[in-house]
Image (cartoon, grey):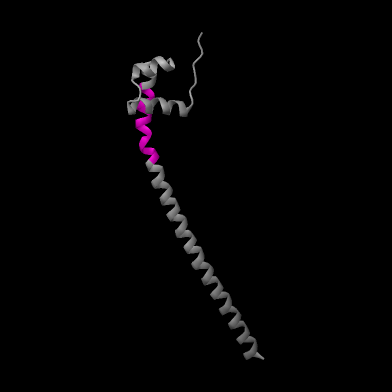
Amino acid sequence: MAQRRSFSAKFKTQVVLDLLTGRKRMAQICREYNLKEQVVMRWRAMFLERAELLFSAETERDEHLEHIADLERLVGRLTMELDIAKKASQLWGSRATRGGS
């Protein structure tokens, strides 16, 4: 019984790009790499189906970076408010001890 061959993602991508760009024809690819046309067509369909994910991932990354920046601004603001509250607490504490003596 023949074993199934396994191909890397890089190899599949190169085969599909050769086909899509017209550098090689289907028959040439099949002969050169000893592949069946159905296999190459399946890789091509998968490639085209998932191509938009490349650009949507970029959009999601930008949204995540924007969210991180918002959170960093919030942390900065809260840190300043905490520092002000600490100083006010110290000020009120020193006035209470002076006024109560």
Quadrant placement of the C terminus:
bottom right
Q: Quadrant of residue 89?
A: bottom right
Q: Residue furthest right?
A: 101
Give above or below for 57 relative to 23: below
Q: Position of residue 52 (x, y in %)?
A: 35, 38
In the image, what residue occupies the spot 65% across and 86% down?
Answer: 97
Which residue is nearer to you in this view: 81 or 9? 9
Residue found at the very far top of the displayed protein: 1
Residue 47 placed where, x, y %? 38, 30
Q: Residue at coordinates 49% horizontally, 17% vertically from top-left?
A: 5
Q: Position of residue 75 (x, y in %)?
A: 51, 63
Is residue 39 at all visible to an observer of this figure? yes
- Of the pair 5 and 71, the residue shown nearer to us: 5
Most frequent secondary structure within the magenta stretch: helix
Residue drawn 46% across the image and 29% down it: 10
Compared across the picture, whether 31 is left or right of 88 comes to left
Tell me the magenta residue range: 41-54
Query: Would residue 22 be found to the left or right of residue 75 on screen?
Result: left
Whether 17 is among the magenta residues is: no
- From the viewer's perspective, is residue 52 above or below residue 2? below
From where the camera sits, is residue 35 visible? no
Along the line of sight, which residue is nearer the eye, 83 or 41?
41
Q: Is residue 21 left or right of residue 69?
A: left
Please state which of residues 79 and 89 is positioned toward the viewer in this rendering.
79
